[in-house]
Amino acid sequence: MHHASNLPVVQIVHRPGVLDLGWGHPDPAVLPVTVLQRATATVLARYGADALAYGAERGPGPLIEWLCTRLMDTDARAPEPADVVITAGASQALDLLCSLCTTPGDPVLVESPTYHLAVRILRDHPLDLIAVPSDADGIDVAALEALLARMARRGKRARMLYFIPTHHNPTGVCMSLERRKALAALAAQYGVLLVEDDVYRELSYDAPAPPSVWSLAPPGTVARIGSFSKSLAPGLRLGYLTADASLTRRLIGSGLLDSGGGLNPFVALTVAEVCTSGDFDRTVAYLHATYRERRDALADGLRDYLPPGCRFTVPGGGFFQWVELPAEIDAGALLSCAEKTGVSYLPGSRFYLDAPRHNTLRLAFSLYPPHQLVEAARRLGEAITTGA
Ligand SMILES: Cc1ncc(COP(=O)(O)O)c(C=O)c1O
């Protein structure tokens, strides 16, 4: 790609010679450039100046209506239009929820480990973050109950709980249905707003994604945030939120939306065109096939090349493979050796608020084609064997 400026256009920084599985970005080669080209032209022809006006605060009707029918197919319950707000990505949805539902210093619970950049958003507000442990079935609901009871005895109430129950970043775990139900009941009992990060729902490779906690919970308990970053393209900066209508009314009445109107209205109308034309379905089908193959290639490579004592569970969706090294190996200390061998990753400690498990790491299989993922696994195995 040739750009006229020397200043950067994209966020990613490439390092020659390094297969960098640290970035949780899509491969530029899979981004739907021609689909967006077509939809943009169609939207300008169909809506004219309306496509370029300040948008309706909730987001454009065609996208909201499409989302309601889509979630009927991909989730256990469809929202009503009044339950939906279109946002500038999941990140912005989380930021807006923090702005309107918390006061600086409020106690906020965070599943641990978790998406490290969501923690940065929560800290911007700034909130008093408290880790909630999780295991191979998702959040440890019994530990959460004990924590909430302990806080209540001290007269404290957690304002929110941020968590990723479906194809978790970084662990790939899907929370069990039993725990989803128990969590919903517990949150309702203690008056904690669950902020369910659901950005990988469309990227389920083996089976349909489980019902969202939003779909299982009493009204008003959950704000679920979704995104088109993973199912179409992150540069669209487009996502959405489903929550009780009383909460979405507060969000669309915020100063931000009152001043600027709905978020990214031109992009939102364009994405509505992509969705209703059938291009969304075709793109997602292509992404499933592509990412499934990549996930499997990386898993095969890890099976072939990681030394004994390394453990991993192949995820059913999303972008990430979590790897547990033998207990005595520190993935942070190993990183410089790995990079000399030509592979990089994010050390697992980056994803914990407290008590990090140093012998873990996260590999993204989204950015490279299968043969490079196999080579990355080979280099990782070599680094572990020689560097440890
Ligand atoms: C769990 C999770 N939430 C949110 C995001 C960011 O989403 P968006 O691009 O919609 O802001 C990501 C991106 O990696 C993610 O993994």
Image (cartoon, rainbow, N blue to C red):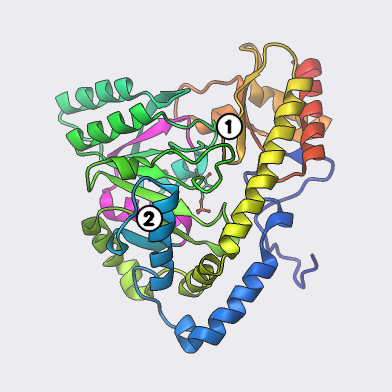
SS under mark 1: loop
The percent coordinates of residue 194 (x first, y second) are: 31, 41
* Quadrant in the picture for residue 158: top left
Image vertical order of residue 148 relative to residue 86, above or below: above
Image vertical order of residue 61 relative to residue 288, above or below: below
SS under mark 2: strand
Residue at 34 percent across and 71 percent down: it is 57
Left or right: residue 24 compared with residue 127: right
Residue at 68 percent across and 23 percent down: it is 333
Left or right: residue 68 compared with residue 89: left
Hey, what amino acid is under mark 2? Leu
Q: Is mark 2 within 8 Å of ligand 1?
A: no
Residue 154: numbered disc: none
Give the extent of the magenta segment.
88-114
Residue 103 is one of the magenta-drawn residues: yes
Classify 10 Å Cα crowding around label 2: few (below 14), some (14-19), many (20 and above). Answer: many
Hey, what amino acid is under mark 1? Pro
Q: Identify the residue position indicated by label 1 in the image.
A: 315
Q: Identify the residue position indicated by label 2 in the image.
A: 241
Residue at 15 percent across and 24 percent down: it is 153
Point out the frontmost of discs 2 and 1: 1
Left or right: residue 32 compared with residue 46: right
Q: Is mark 1 within 8 Å of ligand 1?
A: no
